[in-house]
Image (spheres, rainbow, N blue to C red):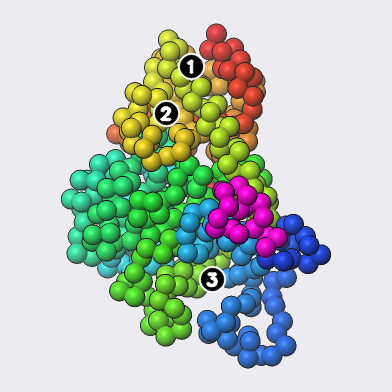
Amino acid sequence: MTTKKGFTTSILHADRLGKPEHGSLHKPIHTSVTYGHEDVQDLVDIFQNKKKGYAYSRQGNPTVTALEQKVTQMEKGLASIAFSTGMAAISATIMALIKHTDHVVASSFLFGNTRSIFQTYIDMGLNITFVDATDVENVRNEIKENTRLVFVETIANPATQIADLEAIGELCAQKGIIYMVDNTMTSPFLFNPIDVKAGLVINSLTKYIGGHGNALGGSVTDTGLVNWTVYPNIFETFKKQVKPETLGLTQIRKKGLRDSGGTLSPEAAHSISVGAETLALRMERCCNNALALAQYFETHPLIKKVFYPGVKSHPQHERAAKLFRKFGGLMSIELDESLDCLAFLNKLKLVVKSSNLGDTRTLAIPVAQTIFFELGAERRAEMGIPETMIRLSIGIEDLDDLMADFKEALG
Ligand SMILES: *Cc1c(COP(=O)(O)O)cnc(C)c1O
């Protein structure tokens, strides 16, 4: 049933198909840390990857599995692993697959904490090159003999640059390099990275998929496009134990999730699963709200610049229109110098002054003073981040109310 039905129908009925007790419509929250087995051979087989099952919840839990299956279904992948946060998913996946003798190419427009963990990996001896990934040529120029992985985001935050997703996918496919795409900003409703040949897909489940700002989570999905049998860093032990297509995720689950301990709690998995049921509805609504607001901001004399892929002035507008179902819920605006950024924000009554994004509520944050503060003014200028930039994560409120709040604050 799941493969033939639409996006939302499939998620709504996913748990029921697993036939949970009493006909429950939700997968129960399994709180047990460990699992007992009648025959110890079963436990041995689970340890040796010969049998599916649960041993210790740090590396697997039935409630979390139910969410992993939904993410896989949404991303049209082979299988997924959930983590405690998006950052745990990214850091554990890289840790599990990359050795210090390897080279990684990453977009220079990255979520701040992803940039920060990559810097930590550099400090530990890994070779990572950052490039402007809006043009595939910049990526191609940095590919070396030992380049194992290319990492990009779909829509970057806060300036909304869009990576050259299709062309980089072609390049990675030609060269046999793992293409890892962080799909958080678009979510699997707007875009599936498998369609541009991504091998691994990251989602921060905290954002649009969970969607209500009440649970942290992250995931990595194997799309099935990586040939793990020729990937040089797979442990010999795993090669003897599991099917070739599951080698990558086996290594990420064991070496990444198990060893880092970035485990998603069953309670959070349940909240995120419930949130995921309405992903399509929420995305439709917040994207429509965002587009209407962006068009209003574009005509306003006190707003110098709008960063939103949905407006024609955006440098990658055509690319976004071709690849994504809609243009997303995130935008940034640059205020006229005559306005004080913080004073303007304080005039907003409905919009919440807060970090995070992908909430049902509209959130606003001054960029230079908060999420990009650590970088300093010089790096911000290099990255094209104006000092009066405000990042907006548009929610699902009634558009008239949002419009009125911004009009009031600008008036
Ligand atoms: C928020 C975010 C992350 C990290 O996710 P957490 O769940 O907060 O750890 C990673 N990538 C992108 C693009 C994000 O927006």
As drawn, is 66 to the left or to the right of 232? right
Q: State the residue in front, 111 or 358.
A: 358
Q: Earlier in the sequence, mark 2 or mark 1?
A: 1
> Label 3 amino acid?
Arg
Q: Residue at x 61, y 25 (%)?
A: 351
Secondary structure under the numbered disc 1 in the rendered image: helix
Picture coordinates of residue 154, whole percent (x, y) = 40, 44
353 horizontally vs 199: left or right:
right
Residue 185 can be seen, yes or no: no
**Residue identified by numbered label 2:** 310
Residue tagged 3:
258
Front residue of 167 and 111: 167
Q: Amino acid at mark 2?
A: Gly
- Provide the secondary structure element on which disc 2 rests: loop
Q: Looking at the image, tell me whether mark 3 or mark 1 is earlier in sequence order.
A: 3
Number of numbered discs overlaid on the protein picture: 3
Q: Is residue 108 left or right of residue 11?
A: left
Q: Residue at x 45, y 34 (%)?
A: 327
Q: Using the image, determine if residue 196 lies above or below residue 291.
A: below
Q: CA distance from mark 3 to mark 1?
A: 48 Å
Residue drawn 63% across and 43% down? 278
Position of residue 287 measured from the top left corner of the image (x, y, whole percent): 52, 32
Which sits in the foreground, 299 or 206? 299
Q: Which residue is mark 1?
A: 296
* Residue 399 pos. (x, y %): 60, 22
Crowding at mark 2 (Cα within 10 Å: few <14, some 14-19, many 20+): many
Residue 58, percent from left and from top: 61, 69
Report if residue 389 lies within the magenta region. no
Which badge, 3 or 2, is on the more N-terminal residue?
3
In the picture, which quadrant includes the N terminus?
bottom right
